[in-house]
Image (tube, rainbow, N blue to C red):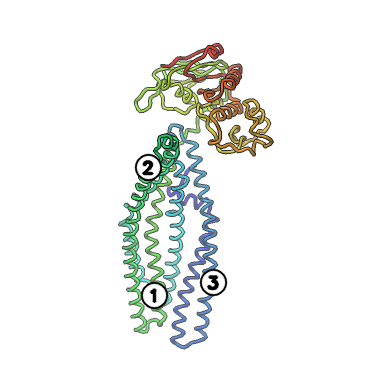
Amino acid sequence: MSFNKTYIFHYIKQFKKENLIMFLILMLGSLSLTAWGFSTSFVLTSLANKHMESFYFWVSIMIISLIIWSIQIHLDSWYYTKTVQKMNIEIRKDIAHHVGQMEYQDFQKKDTGEYTSWMTNDINMINDYGYATLHMIITQILTILFGSIALFTFHYSLNILVIMLAIIMIVVPKFFSKQMDKNINDVSNENESFTKHSNDIFDNYTLYYSTNNEETITKKFVNASQSLADKKLSLAKLTGAMYGTTNFVSLFSQVIIILVASILFLKDLSPIGTITAAQYFSATIFTSLIGLSANYVELKTTQPIFEKFFESKKRSVSKAHLSEILDGIEFSNVSVKYDQLKILDQVNFKFELGKKYALVGPSGSGKSTILKLLMGLIIDYEGTITVDGKDIRNFSKESWVNHFAYLEQTATIINGTLSENINISITNKPKEITELLNFVGLSYWLNGKNIDEYIVTHKKLSGGQKQKLSYARALMKDAKIILFDEGTSALDRESALVIEDHLLSSNKTVIIITHQLTDRLRQKIDKVYYLR
């Protein structure tokens, strides 16, 4: 998808109907407050002139204005939240889509806690400094517009003076703009860091518990919290300085307007109510100008947050579709390195369709790296990997991955139903899933429940149960090539043998990773590749 230069308005345009209604609600509020201020002026003038009929009329207008304003506040609160939540859902959808289109290696450059922070902390910052700020800006513009029209009805000179003072009000906050951008970005980055540290601390809870270092948890959280607090304090100091300066200019401008209104009355150029009107409308106009100029600075600070979401490049979607693998896959002088450390150095392998292979070697020899290359999880490598003689780089990730089922040593479990865990796609296949549960020995989980009722949680499963569930998922995919990264390491021997026998007696291409190759397994393998 493509985005407008200013991201926040992209989402406002997407929900233009809702935002138009929101604008009309804000206009209703500004009109009712303008009517209130206007009527107070005429109440004073009528009273001074002892025109009681006019006095009661304008008092009635004041009461009606207050009633309308009260109703508007209720509508504003409800409809604003409704509209913002719709836009939040759309932002999260776009972030999720963009992350889903990233290359796997690009995705791995950030900790998962950072992506979580995007969906939570950064969305909150967009709401606070983006939508809430824009909501105030629109209210302020309407207040300034209607207030200026009201002042013009008393004397044109008041408008000229307001314009001159308004220019000063607008210029002052610009001196803070650049530093505000930096401080907002610092808070956003520190929020990500805090989430990352929090995840890391809780992920290592077992380590702290087993070494009697529970106090370390507290210390780490205090340090991370202090760092976040420092960034927020810097932002608060700058925000305070900006608002302090603009408030001073605002109040000083109001004094000037009231003095001019008083002079106009003394020279019989306007009624006495002009002083009340000048006091009320100058206060609303300049208070709005304070917010308008400062809020405009705040609104712009959301742009770097959006840019952070979408800065990573998407995968190319214009590549060829691989509908079928006919012969096999070949590695030719393939090398992979992480941070200058070579994991694979000009290796050569050939995997023919329908045959069984074992990758044997010690930890760190590159066995798992080979499977990740086959799955397209690693794209930065030297040499060539071909399928039926064609470079795999020419094919789309979507069509390539369809031919593989990947069983990691640490099985991935979704906190959800059995159906969601075995059949990752939305389409439900209850009969096939139930049969697979019977085969892998997990049918006892159901105990009268259906696959959409039984809830699986990562914490409740043993390592063996996770691997069985992972194997059922691989069978459900019905891929031609099975990549098996010590997928039975957590199972009892009998269960492991059942799965291995089923796998190796199938007509699928199987590539197994193991540290030690047993004689029993060796007899069923067509070729063994040893890595050092």
Q: Nearer the viewer, residue 385 or 264?
A: 385
Q: Secondary structure at mark 3?
A: helix
Q: Do tag 1 and tag 2 residues touch (Cβ < 8 Å)?
A: no
Q: Residue 425 appears at what percent x and percent y? A: 59, 35
Which residue is at 32% across, 63% downward?
A: 244
Quadrant including the C terminus: top left
Measured along the vertical axis of the image, is residue 274 above or below residue 382? below
Q: CA distance from mark 3 to mark 2?
A: 53 Å
Res. 503 image quadrant: top right
Amino acid on which disc 1 is placed: Gln
Which residue is at 53% across, 18% downward?
A: 328
**How crowded is the residue under tag 2: few (<14 C-alpha within 10 Å), some, or many (20+)?**
some
Q: CA distance from mark 1 to mark 2?
A: 54 Å
Q: Which residue is mark 1?
A: 279
Q: Which mark is residue 220?
A: 2
Q: Secondary structure at mark 2?
A: helix
Which residue is at 34% across, 84% downward?
A: 267
Which residue is at 37% across, 56% downward?
A: 297
Q: Residue 58 appears at what percent x and percent y? A: 50, 80
Q: Which residue is mark 3?
A: 67
